[in-house]
Image (cartoon, rainbow, N blue to C red):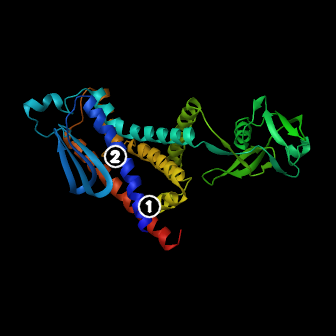
Amino acid sequence: MGHSALAFIVVIGILVFIHEFGHFIAARLCGVGVQTFSLGFGPKLLKKKFGRTEYCLSVIPLGGYVKMVGDEPDAPIEPEDIKDSFTHKSLLKKCIIVAAGPFSNFFLAIFIFYALYQFGGVYLPSPIVDQVVENSPAIRAGIKPGDVIKEINQKKIESFEDIFKIIGTGNGQQIDIVIERDGQLKGFALTPELKPGKSIFGEDIEKYIIGIIGSGNVFHKRFGPVQAMEKALSDTYGLIKLTILSVVKMVSGSVSSKNLGGPLMIAQMAGEQAKAGLMNFAFFIALLSVNLGIINLFPIPVLDGGHLLFFGIEAVTGKSISDKLREKMIQFGAAMLVALMVFVFYNDIVRLVNGG
């Protein structure tokens, strides 16, 4: 438990620091004064003032905040502070400052993936056929165990994942496969069949298959700087899409909300990934960083997305919403977040009780 708690503090500390530093650096670049930069909430354990900004480490490690000059619309501002006030900046600058937090989390994921791919590489499944399913397109075409898939539709196949991608996006059209068998290349034409299967969310779906199972062998691939960046950008974008799709499916009810986890689940998983090694731990941080960025962009008052919603309304109507309406919306958003936190804590406790 102590190992998990330490891993949790490290993970949350990194994610919160990057998020709040995004707000902080954007505020400074946009000419807004920062009064407080805090990691954590509640009573301050450590604090040190440099220039105008007080840097704090607070007791509750579940978040953080950046307090800027004039970030409360109804708060009085000294005349000499107006030029440094958040409230008195343009809509564009305010949007940049607010959005900088979530986007810093996306940049962290890109950086972690880039470092992993550049310096560690990846292990990919070899495109070697281990089994051919009975009465499948592959067995009817003449593909055999031991064949190495070299090309599909004139596209070079590097790993078994490439096969799934091409077949999955081919809409069941005929494909031309080149395999290597006993040192010789052979070509086959076959048409994938639609079969029942499961999505990554556990849903019943139909997907195109040709009926081959991989050997499970893997090979190590290293990336050059450009390739590493391309893959880092691609994987981060893929994670963002997958996270948004997960939320949509959870809201629609097609994926169970029991999958939601809170601090206890994160602590448990952080401990497991830390024990598995630095690369696993770093990947876990990147995954959570993307999730944190997406969640903060939800159009819920008190979150960054809620502030962007307010600015969007102001941009369309030409005037900011009233302080009274803003306050009610923030109270509603806070109530939603509290309810969500209670729910995820409940899920965590149920998992612990059930030994999950």
Q: Distance between the residues labelled 1 and 2?
A: 18 Å
Packing grade of label 1 (10 A; few <14, some 14-19, many >=20) is many
Disc 2 marks which residue? 17
N-terminal label among 1 and 2: 2
For the point 54% across and 43% down, the residue is 116
4 or 278, nearer to the observer: 278
Point out the image quarter for the N terminus.
bottom left
Horizontal side of residue 174 vs 256, given as left or right: right
For the point 49% across and 38% down, the residue is 110
Horizontal and vertical percent position of residue 169: 70, 36
Amino acid under disc 2: Phe
Tell me the SS state at disc 2.
Answer: helix
193 or 34, nearer to the observer: 34
For the point 49% across and 58% down, the residue is 274
342 or 97, nearer to the observer: 97
Horizontal and vertical percent position of residue 198: 68, 52
Residue 22, relative to residue 342: is it above or below? above
For the point 89% across and 41% down, the residue is 181
Amino acid under disc 1: Ala
Disc 1 marks which residue? 267
Horizontal side of residue 226 vs 162, given as left or right: left
Horizontal side of residue 121 vs 19, given as left or right: right
**What numbered label is drawn on residue 172?**
none
Q: Which quadrant would residue 34 be assigned to in this image?
A: top left
Residue 87, relative to residue 340: is it above or below? above
Horizontal and vertical percent position of residue 43: 21, 58
Tell me the SS state at disc 1.
Answer: helix
